[in-house]
Image: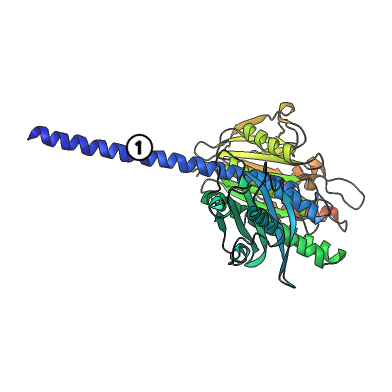
Amino acid sequence: MKISILIIIIIIMTGLYIHQYIRKYKYKVRARLARTERTEMIDFINRYAASIGYSENTDEWMEQVARFIAQAIEAQNVFIFFMDSDDNTARKIARYGVFPAYDGDINKRTHKFIDDIERELINLNSEGLINQVISNISVLKDDFKEHYGAGPIETLMSVPLKIDGDQLGVICAINRSGTTRLFDSESVFLLESLSSQVALGLTFTQIYERLNQQQRIEQELELAKNIQMSLLPSDSPIHHNYQIFADCIAAREVSGDFFDFIQISEDLLLVIVADASGKGIPACMLMSMCRSIIHTNAWRFKEDLEGLLREINSHLYEDTDAAQFITLACLLIDKHDHVVDYARAGHTELLIQSPTGDIQIISPDGPALGLLPNELSNYDTFSFKWQPGASIMMFSDGLTEALDEDDDELGLEGLLELWKAMDRSPEKATHGILAEVKNFAGDRQQEDDQTLIILHRPELV
C-alpha cells in the first residue's frame, strides 16, 4: 500500500515537472518570437524614417518603402496599391521583387492569375480577394497548388492600409523568402503592424497631391509639430527623493530638440536630452527613430551608457546619410544609492551645482550619433554620488548660443550666472532661466530651440 502511494506521488510530481517545463519552453518560444518581431519592426521604422524626403517623387519613395517591407516580413514580392476615393478605383504605386519568379512553363490558369494581380488587384475568385481587404479584413492564402496547380505562387497575404478608419489602399506580399516556406498568422500580424506606417506615407501622398506649395509647408509644419509633441513626456517623473522639471521652447513651429524620462527599473531612471539635425518632418522622424531605438534598447544597456550610445550610433550611421545626426546626453540615476552615471554624444556639458552654489562642469568625450562608424566612436562615462542639496542641469546649445541685439552670445558663463541666481526649485529655476534668456535676446528672434532639464536632491531632514 505504501509503495502504491509512493508511485502515485512520483507520477504526480513528474507530471507537474513536465507541465512546468512545457510552460517555460512555451514562454521562451513566445519571448524569442516577440524579440524577433520587435527587431523587424524597429528595423523597418528606422529605415522608413530615414527615407522621409528621400525623393520628391512619391512613387519612387514608396518603391523604397516596399523594399523595406519585403525585408521585414521576408517576402519575395510586395505590392502597394492606392485607392482613389473619387472614382473608387485603385492603382499600383509600388512594387518590389521580380514577379513572376519561376523556371519553365506555367499553365494558362496560373498565367491568368498572374495577370489578375496587376490588372484586377489579386482577384482570385468570384468573391474577389480585394473586396475582402477593402472591407478591412486581412487575408492569408496558402492553397494555390490545390486551386491553381503548380506555379510561381505558393503563399500570399494581403492587408488593408487605413488611418483613422479611412481606407487608403492595400498591401500584398507574395511568396516567402525565409527558411519557412509559407506565411502564417504571425506574418500577417507583423504586416498589419507595418501597414500603419505605410498608411502614414500614403497620407503624406494625398496631402502633397492636393495642396499647393504654401499649403504643403503649413501642413508639414503642423504634422511635424504634432509628431514632436507626442514624443515629449507630458509630465516629469515624481519621486520622493528628487525634484525634476523640464521644458522645451521651439524656435519655430517645429523643434529639433527633445527630452525623455525612461523608468528602466524600480531603481533606475534614464534621463535623455538630444538635438536632432535638420528641420520639418525629417527632423521629427529622426527624433522618432532615435527615441524608438532608445526605448527598445534601454533595458538591455541599463547599466552601460556607452553600450547604449554605441547601439544608437550603429543604427543611425547605417540608416541615415551624413547630413542627419543627433547630439545626445544621457543621465542614469540609481535611486537606491543615489549614484549617477553620465555620458554624452557631441552634446552640451553636464552642470552640477553643490549645496553651497559652486558649479562643476562635466564634459566626457563622445562624437555625435550617426556621424562615424562604431569602430571610430568612443563614448566616455562619468560617475558621481548625488549629494543631498545638489542640483543637476542638462540643456541644449540653444541656451548658451542665444544672441542679443548686438550679436553677443550668452555663453556658458552667462548660463552659469543665471542658474546661481535662481531658486533651488527645478520648476522655478527652469522658468526663471528661460525667461532671462528671452530678456537677454530682447527683440531678436530666437534662432535655435531651447531645452532645459533641472534635477534637485533636497537636503536631508
Is 276 in front, or is 110? 110
Residue beneath the point at 57% across and 59% down: 138
Circle 1 residues within 10 Å: few <14, some 14–19, many ≥20: few
Residue beneath the point at 81% across and 67% down: 210
What amino acid is labelled 1 in the image?
Tyr
Q: Position of residue 331 (x, y in %)?
A: 63, 39
Is 390 in front, or is 221? 221
Q: Residue furthest bottom?
A: 86
Determine whether 169 is above or below 287 in the image.
below
Q: Residue furthest left?
A: 1
- The residue indicated by pointer 1 is 21
| Disc 1, SS | helix
Specify whether 264 is left or right of 78: left
Q: Position of residue 179 (x, y in %)?
A: 56, 38
Is 201 in front, or is 321? 201
Residue beneath the point at 72% across and 68% down: 89
Q: Position of residue 95 (x, y in %)?
A: 73, 51
Q: Residue furthest top?
A: 375
Assign the N terminus to one quadrant of the image: top left
